[in-house]
Each structure stands twice: as structure tokens, then as C-alpha cells.
Amino acid sequence: MPSDPIDSEARYTVYKVAGGKRRSALWLRLLRWTALVVIVCIAAVAGSWFGWLQNTVAQLAEKNPVTVEQTRKELVPDLPGEAMNILVLGSDHRYQYGSGDVGRSDTLMLLRLDPKTKSVSILSVPRDLRVQIPGHGADRINTAYAVGGPALSVKTFKSVTGLPVHHFMEVDFVGFSNIVDALGGVYLDVDRRYYNPKDTGWAAIDIKPGYQNLNGHDALQFARFRHDATGDFGRMVRQQTFIRELKRQSFRWDNWRRIPRVVKMVTKNTTSDLSSLRQWLSLARLVLEVDTSRVYSTHLVARGIMVNGASELEASPAEIAAVVEQFTHPDKAAVKPPEGKKMPKDSFVVYVSNGGAGAGTASRVAAQLNDEGYKAVVAGDLTPARGGATTIYASRSYSGNAKGIAALMKPAKVVRLDRQDGTVAGVSVVVGSSFGGKLTMQPKHSVTAYGQQIQYGANHDAAAWRQFTRGTPIKVRMPTAWVSGCTYDWADSRKYRIPTGDGDAAALCVVGETALGEYWHIQQMRWTDPPAVAAPDETRTIGGTDYMLFYNGAKRHMIAWQVDNTLYWVSNTLGNDLSNDAMLALATSFKPVK
């Protein structure tokens, strides 16, 4: 069996990025921003520039003074040196549902800037979450904005989460695109193709996969997209991704010529209680002090329910408290787990039922699963499945383990079900008549981690790689390790050129799909220092190659490395469905396409 990079601890070293070129680059960026502040102060002596800036910023409150004054009554004063919470409301005033309706709020996002830890936390709440709105009863949380504007949104958010809100910012979606354009666009790592043609009833969108600079219109469409299986969950993750990359790319916008236009765009399309130049300079200083690798994001994952025939979302107080704890203590969530299984086999129950197989089959399967290390029990007989298929049912938390069991019981399929309150936790196996009677033993050339089978030396779809990469100037490499259930989406994969600010560079993006229909991808390009690889969370040297690791909490979201004049990286799915082990196995297995 090929040497496993996950287990070969002697083959790599681990160190935090705390110095060298990247630290120097960060100081250079801060010095450039400091120089801008000095310029502003010098201009203040003359009076003209300072006066214009002060008057322009004041428009944030003067534009809608009644709204700002009402909302200020719900805000909590921030304390010097303590964490500051800013509630960001994304609104769209183009849509009016009735007379007197102020529009809708599609985005509720709390930003926490902590000067002590030099970190930013982002908490997103789905707009369809059913909550108690003070004075209005139970309804979707975005209804608070429709009936009471930002003031009621702040009051409701505080009531639901128990968190203080020190400031608020209401950003108009139309203006959002203008702000992005004023900044010169934002580089984003797009996981797959997003496409809705015109006249479908949904917002039209056509964004191809791969790392690219998105203009304001496309960035807005990307951040607001929710017409797929991930719904609001995917939209929240994309919005958090946008905020994180906005911070990472702050060094790109230190051109003083941009400042007047950007300030005008922000003030024109934003309403906020932050309406003095002093407040904004303090906020800017706090943001600039944040280490890019310490931007954490979390979101509330709720269950779907039906209320009066309409689909809404529900979360228990305990679930809300857990996500608030993660938000306020991001360092706890960021601790990397040891390499190994995400959920040990004996940490949950596997319920085995007979769904059309022979008498006694459920008992035999349970016994075999116990021999494999699972905690399996017999749960009785169920209606036979159509076609005699064996089906494994599991919630999202157990889906990786369910796929591991499915690999033992081929042919079998995995069905993901939302976990409902009052139901048992674990994995349910319904054995169909197609089951052969014995589990399929794991092949010797593979290991199973986090419920995902990792195969080494697989060279999956090598012929398609050769066909796809013909004619590109890039020294193309492909992973020789593979993860069970994954496939390539060659129809959406593409070769292209990416603008770098100093011309353009050859690039290609290969899209992958997991067994559950989530998208991950491989990026390769001749641009070796894009914003995406600035300030990695961790660097490992494995087999003589330096790998840059980027995390979302405890999950590895991206692993990047450079060979000669080409940069390569593997990006996880939006929900980071590939295990940490799988990500490292894929990245460290790349070989030239021949």
C-alpha cells in the first residue's frame, strides 16, 4: 500500500505562519493604510478634504434620521477595548409587497470585531427562521424588518440570540453592486457554475466556476443565490465567504484615488448610526488590525417546518445557544481535531431493519456491523424498498458514516434526512432483497476516515484529464488519491485566463461532486500570489513541498501549494463535506498529467 501522508507524521513539519515574507507584506499594507490616515489628517488642517469627508459620512444618519433615531434606542453602547457587534441588514427596496411596506431584508448578519484577539466573527441567521417578534408574535425573522424596520430587526435579533448589538448598518442591495465596482471588483473562488436563465421567475445569473474577479452585479448575484438544494444555508455561506475575502483583499484598495468614490458609494447606499468620521476611523483601524487568518464564520442550521402551508425554519433554544457560543468564542471552534475519524464507529447506534431480505438477515447484518466496530441493533421489519435496494438513512451529521456503511453493503444507496426533534439519532439501515448476505470488506489499498473511503493510486478519470488539459500552457497535475462517491463534472470544468492586475494568466478549474451532490473543485493557474493564498492558517512541509492550509473553524476548506511557476489548490464544498483527511490526501497526491 502506498505510504499514507496522513499517518506518516515524520514526513512533514507543522508551523504557524508568524513571520517571513507574509508578515512583512502585512506590515507594508498597514504602513500604506497608515500613510493614508496621515494624508487625511494633513488635509484636515487645510479643512477642505476633512470637511467633505465629515459631511459625506454624516449622510449615513441624515438620509433617514427617524429610522436611525428609533434604532439607536435598541442599541447597546460599545465599550472601549471590548468586542463590538454590528448588525448588517441587506435590504432590497425595489420590491414592495403592499402599501407602506418598507421592503424586505434578505440578509441578517452580525459582525463581531474583537480588539483583544484581533479577530472577526460572522454569525448568519436564515431569513425564514421562525421566531417571536416583540409585539407581533411568531413569524419569520425577516418579517421584523418589513413591519418595524431596522429598529425591530435589532430588537428581535437581541431577543433571539441574547447578544448585544452596538451598531447597525443597512445596505441596499442595488448599492452593494456599486460599492464593489468602486473597489474594482472582488476576487472570489467560485465552486461551480451558477446559472438561471432570464424569464424563469428567479434572478438571472450566469457565473462560471473558478477563481475570478467578480464585478458588482455578479458579486451580488453570487451572494444572493439560493435556488439550489442548499437554499438559505448556501446563501449564508456565500455571503460569509464574500465578507472574508473582502477583508483578505483590503490591501488591493489602498489607492487614494479610489477613496472619494468608495466613500460616496457607501454613504449613498448605507444607513447607519455610525455617522461620524471619528467612528469610521476607529472602525477602520480595528478592521485593519485584524489578522486575515482570524476571520471566523458560523451560521445557524435550522430544520424545515410547515406553517399554514408555508415553508419556514425552526431551531431550538439549545441550538441557538450553541451557535452563539461558537460565535463569541471562535478560538474554541478553530482548534484543529487530531487526524482520524470524524465520528467513531461506536459513538452512535446503527438501527438495522429488514426491508424485504430473507428471514434473519437483519440480525446477521447487525452482527457483522458489530464485528466491524459499529454499535448495531436490530430494529424490526419494514416495508420492502422498490427494486429490493438496500437504503441507509442518516442526517447530515452522520452522512459520512452512512456512506461508509453503504460501501460495505453494495449495492446500497444513502438518503439524507433532516433530523427531527423527538426522533432517534444515528444511522438507519433498511436491508433490501438485493443484499448478498455478507459485507464487502474494505480493499487493502484504501483507508476510511470520517466515513469517507480514501483510495490511493486510483488515478481516477486519467483519460478525461488528458483530454481536458490539451493545449493549456499550465503544467497540469491531477490527484492520484480519490474519495469514494466523488465524480468529476467535466461539463462545468473550464480553461480560461484570469486578470491579475498586471495582465492576465492562464488558469483552469476542474469541478468535483460528492455522493450527496455537493461541489468541490481543483484550481490551477500561472498566477502564484493571488489574494486567495494570503495569510494561511497553517503551513505543512510534506515530501519537500510546502502546503498552505486554510480552515473554516475546525474544517479544512482549502489546501494550496506551488510547484515552479504554477499555483495549485483544492477547495472543499460550501459545507466542507470532504473530511480533513480527504482534503490532505487529495492535495498531497497530485502528479503530472501524462
Image (spheres, rainbow, N blue to C red):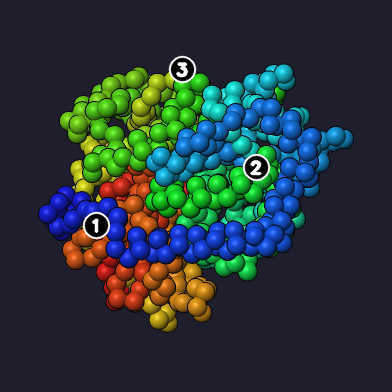
| Residue 38 at x, y percent in the picture | 54, 61
Q: Nearer the viewer, residue 558 or 45?
A: 45
Q: Position of residue 157 (x, y in %)?
A: 60, 29
From what the image shows, is residue 159 above or below residue 413? above
Check disc 2: other Cα within 10 Å, few if <14, some if 14-19, many if 20+.
some
N-terminal label among 3 and 2 = 2
Residue 240 horizontal/vertical position (percent): 52, 47
Q: Earlier in the sequence, mark 1 or mark 3?
A: 3
Mark 2 is on which residue type?
Answer: Leu
Side of 369 where 262 appears, left or right: right
Residue type, numbered disc 1: Arg
Residue 118 in the image: state x and y as whole percent.
Answer: 42, 45
Measured in 3D between alpha carbons, the distance from the residue under mark 1 to the one under mark 3, in whole angstroms, is 44 Å
Q: Mark 1: few, some, or many residues within 10 Å (few <14, many ≥20)? A: some
Mark 3 vs mark 2, foreground winner is 2
> What residue is drawn where x is 35% and y is 41%?
334
**Which image quadrant is residue 276 in?**
top right
Circle 3: residue type:
Gly
Quarter assignment of residue 133? top right
Q: Which residue is mark 3?
A: 422
